[in-house]
Image (cartoon, rainbow, N blue to C red):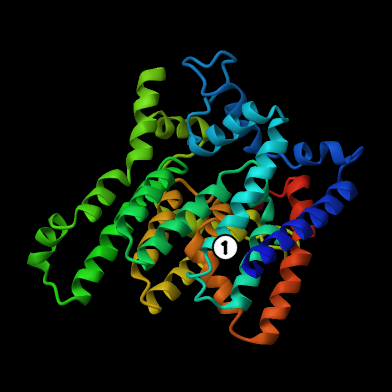
Amino acid sequence: MVLLLIPVGFAVLGLLVRYLAYIHTVDGASLNNFATGLCQWDCGWYVRLAEQGYDPFPVPSMVNAGNWAFFPLFPLLVGVLRNLLGLPTMVVATATSLVLSITAARIAWPLLGKDLRAYILFSAFLLAGPFSVYFTTFYSEALFLLLTAAVFVALQQRNYLAAGVFAALVSGTRIVGVFIVLAIVLQAWLDHRAQGGRLRDFVPAVLKRPDLMVAIFIAPLGLFAYMAYLHWHIGDALAFSHVQRAWGRATGNPLGYLWTGLTNFPRDGWVPTVSQQLATAWLVGFALTLVLVVRRQFAAALYCLICLTLPLFAGLASMLRFVVGLAPISVTAMSLLAGRTWLAYLALAIIIVGNYFGTIGWLTGVLTLV
């Protein structure tokens, strides 16, 4: 009960702080418009998906891009609940995200080493922190983080079949989700080695484990189902990738993008540019991935490295959101901050105060948060 009440309490506190930021920032703000008022940037695309589904081809409005880049699981879930409940889309989406984030915090308890201080910080970070808008409005971060945490909890318990089921759902939530199958395979290899197994015995050992075989084969199922739908719907199974050109995401050298971002100094003042902030977010994520390696959490480290590196091939856009939405990275950061009592209290205060200013930044168009 305590482990449930902690994230619920932070969910209520987070709503109150975000509402204060909303009424102090938006002209004509009201409680009735609160959920819609926080719907910024890509949120509008998700609302349209939940209400109307995927665009045909060509797109009727002749905009530069269709909505195929957004994976279907979360908007599908909100769309179904919206039709069942008959409530406004953003009200349903906000409530769903809050429930998913509360559940994610509870599921992450074993990943946090059952450390209560780390659990409190993690709950606060998700539901009342500077980036809580990602996890409490209509974005896929809440579901993605929940399912990712569920995969690694299942792997921690050596429940490969459950890990495979959750991995299939992850692959239908975000484009990088399909690569979590590699974390399952790596964890299986590590378990094989821990039992004295050799390299040449690994494949035969896997073939003798029906649960592991099924997990590996069903892990990409969400992506494959989406590809089959896109092929049937518009004739392009890879539309989610091809449409990236319309979003201005040209592939290039990831190290070049990172260096360009870091060296894009401000012309006036001392505040780092948006590019520098996004590049720093990537470096923080990479540093926390190295911490995972030091802690011998190799499967989680591999997945985080993939999830950080692949988007970098298309530039630094949305990098902050990609970093904070990775469950192993957020869990690791909160566990480090919980290591000292004074640091935990300080971090908790900064997290809650950051919720107010982060929400203001979200509402006023701070590009780092996009």
Comparing 40 with 229, the one in front is: 229
Residue 82 x/y as whole percent? 64, 30
Q: How many marks?
A: 1
Q: Is residue 8 above or below residue 344?
A: above
Residue 263 in view of the camera? no
Q: Residue at x 59, y 30 (%)?
A: 79
**Residue drawn 41% across and 57% down?**
151
Residue 303: name its quadrant: bottom left
Which amino acid does the dot numbered 1 rest on? Arg
Give whichever of 29, 250 is nearer the camera: 29
Quadrant position of residue 13: bottom right
Horizontal placement of 27 versus 76: left or right? right
Q: Which residue is mark 1?
A: 106
- Name the residue at 52% across, 25% down: 66
Viewer can see residue 70: yes
Is 294 positioned to the left or the right of 33 in the image? left
Badge 1 marks a residue whose secondary structure is helix
Give the answer, above or below, for where 53 lies relative to 149.
above
Find residue 84 and report its horizontal and vertical position in percent: 63, 28
Image quadrant holding the N terminus, namely bottom right
Q: Is residue 258 above or below residue 219?
A: below
Residue 99 % position (x, y): 63, 50
Which of the pair 340/211 is nearer the observer? Answer: 211
Left or right? Give the position of 97 relative to 15: left
Picture layout, residue 298 above or below residue 20: below
Which residue is outermost to the right? 28
Give how far across and how far down residue 16 sits, in percent. Answer: 82, 55
Mark 1, other Cα within 10 Å: few <14 / some 14–19 / many ≥20: many
